[in-house]
Amino acid sequence: MAVFTRIILVACLAVCVSGAFKIRDDANGVPRSASEGDVIRDLLARHVKYGIPQPVGSLQVKLGLYVEAVTEVDVEKGTVEVVGFLSLQWEDPRLRFEHSDPFHEVKDVRLPASEVWRPDIELYTQVTPGMQIMNTARDQVLVEYNGTVKWFPMVGLRTLCADLSFDKTEVHCALKFGSWTYQKHAMELAVNHPMGVLSQYRSTGQWTVSEATAERVEAKYECCPDTYVFVAYNLTLQKQDL
């Protein structure tokens, strides 16, 4: 029994290392073209969505923010609300699939975001717990055949902004995003498209975003000896005369 168990474990490890899910031949043993549905079915049947996909070393996660509008500025509470979407990208070898011959021409598939592992990115400066994911019915990830995963969740963000006051016409707010549980040695963050923060922006209301910058920051906290990484998006808001 012990020998049989070891054989099974070796076989499983071989599949995990190869990382590619292959479409089966038809009943006559003739290779058939894979459809997007074939790939999705095989991925969902075999994929393990729990546990970070990089067991050794630090998983590289690219993070981007695209602000579409400022929907509320509450000077009394010191909060700002913006809507837009995030751009996250990482590698998951467990989601690789065959794409090496004419019978496997599918290059990428779309999967429900809830069905795959995703980095636990949170807005550290948020007012209410948990980021509000908008349009959840369309919350999907794009998975490429080489295991690259891209996720573009639409979000509503209510963040603290200590710089707010009634007498100011220009304020600076920082939106800080980082992993809630993973330290730097397990998850590394990089700024994705730092110049694109305002590429989708439209001015509405009395306050407008005039400038946005992004920076990667390493930090240590009194609670924990490890180093954590977050990305800070620094927004400059200007008050318009109505």
Image (cartoon, helix red, strand yellow):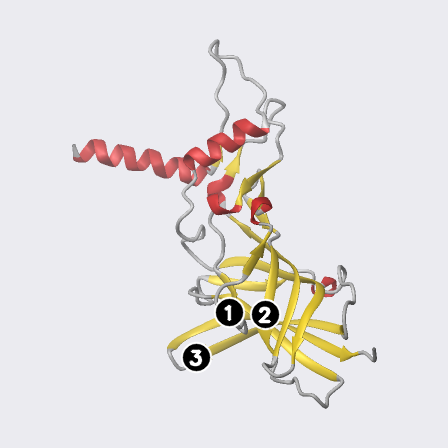
Crowding near the residue tagged with mark 2, few <14, some 14–19, many ≥20 C-alpha atoms within 10 Å: many
Q: Earlier in the sequence, mark 3 or mark 2?
A: 2
Report the residue at 79% width, 67% height from top. Answer: 203
Instruction: Return the residue at label 1.
Output: 128
Report the residue at 73% width, 88% height from top. Answer: 168
Report the residue at 57% width, 45% height from top. Answer: 137
Question: Residue 221 — which label?
Answer: 3
Amino acid type, label 1 = Thr
What's the distance in space between the residues labelled 1 and 3, CA to CA?
Answer: 21 Å
Q: Please tell me whether mark 2 sits on a helix, a strand or a loop.
A: strand
Q: Are marks 1 and 2 in contact (CB under 8 Å)?
A: yes
| Vertical relation: 33 (above or below) 128 | above
User: For the view shown, which residue lies furthest in the left direction?
Assistant: 1
Question: Residue 158 — which label?
Answer: 2
Amino acid type, label 3 = Tyr
Image quadrant in which the N terminus is located: top left
Crowding near the residue tagged with mark 3, few <14, some 14–19, many ≥20 C-alpha atoms within 10 Å: few
* Whole-percent x, y for residue 4 in the image: 21, 31
| Vertical relation: 212 (above or below) 17 | below
Amino acid type, label 2 = Arg
Question: In the figure, is residue 41 to the left or right of 206?
Answer: left
What's the distance in space between the residues labelled 1 and 2, CA to CA?
Answer: 7 Å
Q: Please tell me whether mark 1 sits on a helix, a strand or a loop.
A: loop
